[in-house]
Amino acid sequence: MPIVFTLKFHEIENKHFKLFILIYGDHCHSMLPYIRLACRFLTKGRCFIAPEEIAHPALCRHYKSIILAEYPAWLIVHIIEGRKIHSFHESAKVLVDIFRSTSTMPVIIREGAIGIIPVASISEARKLKRSNPDYVLVGERYGFKIPGFDLNNSPSDISVADLKGKTVVFTSTNGTHVLKKISGTGPIFIGSFLNANATLSRVREFGHVDLVLSGRPDGSADEDVYFGQYFMDLLLGKNPDFGQYAQMVRNSQGAKRLKLMGFKADIEASLDRDSCDFALEFRNGEIVRS
């Protein structure tokens, strides 16, 4: 019997659609990879199809297999390793450096700072401090506080600092390095578990969102990858299990490194979900509330 499959689009909320793929025939299972490819083509690559079958009693009498996918029909989302790419397309971007830059930055603003000036080099940070003695220097190299700086790049340390009304100059091994690379390629937001929902509310308005992972000098950072997957699920309207992702982060290689360096407290501080109810955006050389 020939295989027939029908695509039905049903609007379930503003700009979101459900895609039903109803497959009829004797050889459905062997054809599923081809059907998935066809659906991705028809939806311009934006169709996220669940691999499992969904058994619906009302339909199983008539159809051999059913695949159900729900996706924002207008949204393109990529997870990108920021250290490995040297040119970036125009898009809204979410910078991710869970251990620890993008987890520390929301805490800096929460503790009263009026803005963060991110710089790539230590010398640039010190130059700004000489010109502006009231600026607070926050930063690290390879995890440890830079000599002469006021504070480390540490969400747990920053949480007990008095930064009210201050401007912070910030530099880090990974986060500010990648931020410099993506500057000028579209709106840039700061993403972490601490402000995930607030960031989600801001970036939903864009049709193309790149989640840019900062990684490490020696390769990928698995904690960044886990957050990227978590945030992508949020963008796609799913309900990711935060507890599961948090445990993966606790067991990550990055977490093991922090423990060895004596920064165990920063692991849980970086998992303080939605403790900051604001998004952060990089605008005109400064990171501010968005």
Image: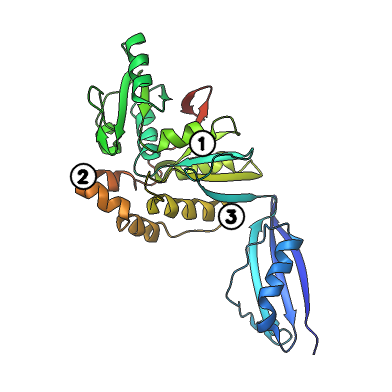
Q: Measuring 51% from the left and 31% from the top, which residue is drawn there?
A: 281
Q: Nearer the viewer, mark 3 or mark 1?
A: 1
Rendered view: 22 above or below 251:
below
Label 1, on which residue?
A: 189
| Residue 194 spot, x, y in % from top left | 39, 42
Secondary structure at badge 3 equals loop
Label 2, on which residue?
A: 261
Q: How far apart are marks 3 and 2 (CA)?
A: 36 Å
Q: In this view, does 57 lie to the left or right of 98?
A: right
Label 3, on which residue?
A: 236
* Residue 283 visible in the snapshot: yes
Q: Do the residues labelled 3 and 1 touch (CB within 8 Å)?
A: no
| Residue 256 spot, x, y in % from top left | 26, 53
- Between 186 and 73, the one nearer to me in the picture: 186
Crowding at dot 3, Cα within 10 Å, few <14 / some 14-19 / many 20+, comes out as some
- Between 245 and 261, the one nearer to me in the picture: 261
| Residue 176 spot, x, y in % from top left | 42, 33
- Between 123 and 254, the one nearer to me in the picture: 123
Q: Is residue 261 left or right of residue 20?
A: left
Closer to the chain start, of discs 1 and 2, is 1
Q: Measuring 31% from the left and 30% from the top, which residue is drawn there?
A: 139
Identity of the amino acid at label 3? Leu
The answer to which quarter of the image holds residue 49 is bottom right
Q: Measuring 59% from the left and 69% from the top, which residue is drawn there?
A: 50
Q: In this view, does 120 lie to the left or right of 182?
A: left
Q: Distance between the residues labelled 1 and 2?
A: 28 Å
Q: Do the residues labelled 3 and 2 touch (CB within 8 Å)?
A: no
Secondary structure at badge 2 equals helix
